[in-house]
Amino acid sequence: MSRMSVALPVCAAMALSTATAAQTAQLDLLDRSVGITSNVVHNNTDEPAVVFSYVATLPQAASMQLRFGRTHLADGCTLRLTSLEDGGVQHHTQTTLNQWQHVSAWFNGSMVFVELLAEPGSGGSHVTIKSAQWIQQLGDARSICGDTDDRVPSEDPRAGRIFPIGCTAWLIDDANHTFLTAGHCTESSSDYEAIQFNVPLSDGDGNWNHPGPEDQYAVDPASMQRGYSGIGDDWAYFGCFPNTETGLTPYQAQGDSYVLADAPPPVTGQPITIIGYGSTSSPVNPQWNLVQKTHTGPFALLDGTTIGYTTDTSGGNSGSAVLDEDTGMAIGIHTNAGCGSGGGYNHGCAIHNADLQNALANPQGVCIPSIMHLSFPEGRPESVLPGVSLDVMFQVESGDESPTSAGIMLHVDGASTMLTGAPLGGDLYSATIPPQVCDADVSFYLLALGDGGTTVQLPNGAPDNRFTLLVGEIAETTLLTESFEDGLPTEWSVSGLWNATNGECAPANDCDGGSSMYFGVDSSCTYDTGSDEAGSLSTPAISLAGITGDIVLTYCSVLQTEDFDDYDRGRVYVNGVQVEQAEESSSWETRELNLGEITADTLTITWTFDTVDNSYNDYPGWHIDGVTITASAADCDDTPTCPGDLDGSGDVGANDLLIVIGDWGLSDSPADVDGDGSVNAGDLLIILGGWGPC
């Protein structure tokens, strides 16, 4: 058995109080190795089936969490976890297991029934139960303002309990209704794996109970932004994935959030409420331990971004909202002890902390709001003929906001022009890019203004990141095409298990028919040889002499592995540089990689596969087929094919005649059709002679 203590952080800014400990719960996180694996299992029947089951047991634990090692859940396969104490159930797919960082929800009791459910014909899967965890409470870090703990149980739907660190987090009124808590509660992603709501009372000995998995949510580590340098700078901003059982976000399930103030008000002793999951000690009812409680006391201190109040708290309250009862707004985040029977204040980080405000203005991960969605329903234009205008249709779908206007920001040779989109009905718009000349540097991006005042752009990162529009006709040169119909071409090279196959291991659907290249063993249709395996498939060196423009690689791929962490790696390299980590697919899919301009004299494409170890290799492997390499460049000639068509309308008519008359006598004008240095009768005759469609 291994043992890991969850330490009680101590704040650096001790001068404010004689006892300013950060208020996480004082816990011991205990871990017992399980080491059970299902090996690779399949459901080859015509009915859904349980293909693996196991009862995980921790006799001494009041509650437990399972931690999974190398686990792959194919499409159609689900992990079902059931508490034998109260029947609480959680279901995991591969997606949700990844979101939960390969752990389960917390279950009450000492036994959890694990089942792997598989639909008929689903691919191979395997489950590894690495360990089971439980938590012991070590003591109580109280900061009670006075002689008695005046907190009472509460049921505020906005506040949740952070596990396993033992802190409080609360829903806020940002666009996606995500969370704030204390920075010292989020030093490691293992500290804040889950947020729990609707927490039940603890047992008679003070051991905490857990809500069902339907009230537990996995934190998105990619969303986490935090600061922690002392009192007044101790905050974290993050979001959670939807619940595995209900599919709801925390806000959708809880239905309420705190409203954030811009800054705390001046100190006048106004009532400050703290709601959180603090610990308790005698004579307080042990069933109130680490469940939601509340107390209100006077506002006592505002010093920069540090706030103080004589409101009762204890270990587990760190991260709680500091609520100004006069306004109903949250003015800060509770972080530190400081109260005692002899006086003092408890402390928090004020809401106007500059770094916190910057994080709120720049959300990450699941905190990023879905304001509006921009796209090209008929495909994004990549080129335009010289001298020809281009109508671009685009779509703006409403999200949290609805569009009030939309358009294209056009950049030509460093100069930008706004092209206002004309509504076409529904959520479609159109804007016209005017005629361009050869060699012009043309790029653009979409933008839409929402009714909430937010501007959304496509692509992300605009205006620095823009779409390129080539002027000219795209000329495509095929550098290589290979379907492996005759097996491995003599110029290609292979190593490891790569081989040409048209046998029963090949995927059922079609890429280009016939043979394909396969990393695997035909006799078993897996890459399991009992040893670790690695190998490469490489094209010959392809000459790029005289080739300009972007190089595009297209190939068909079927990749089926255990799909876990850094094992069974399928990768694509260009001249020795990795350009793609291959994606899992149970049927043929076409992969297209724009490699950009390549300045080397030759080009070599290599597909590599590496099992890394000799475990869990009982999967079909990697098939490659239909390889095509092309070079695309703009072939541009803006010499007028209809000299009298001065306005680019496609015919010679009255507008062109008016242009000649308007520029009569000028020496530098596009109306000088005959190029004699002046707009005169010669140009007029060309207009009249070419009258009509070009």
Image (cartoon, grey):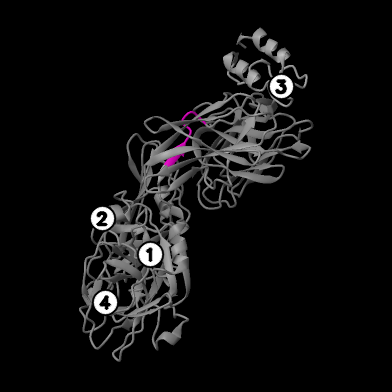
Amino acid marked by disc 3: Gly
The answer to whether residue 112 is left or right of residue 4 is left
Q: Which residue is mark 1?
A: 180
4 or 3: mark nearer the eye: 3
Measure the alpha-carbon separation of dots 4 and 3: 82 Å
Residue 270: assigned label: 4
Q: 595 and 89: which one is in front?
A: 595
4 or 1: mark nearer the eye: 4
The answer to whether residue 39 is left or right of residue 495 is left
Find out whether the residues at labels 1 and 2 contact each other: C-beta distance under 8 Å. Answer: no
Range shown magenta: 373-379
Q: Is residue 378 covered in magenta?
A: yes
Q: Is residue 644 above or below residue 633?
A: above
Is any atom of residue 511 visible in this view? no
Residue 553: assigned label: none
Q: Earlier in the sequence, mark 1 or mark 3?
A: 1
Q: Earlier in the sequence, mark 2 or mark 3?
A: 2
Quadrant that contains the N terminus: bottom left
Q: Earlier in the sequence, mark 4 or mark 1?
A: 1
Q: Which residue is mark 2?
A: 255
- Expressed as whole percent of the image width and height from the top left, the position of residue 225 reads 46, 63
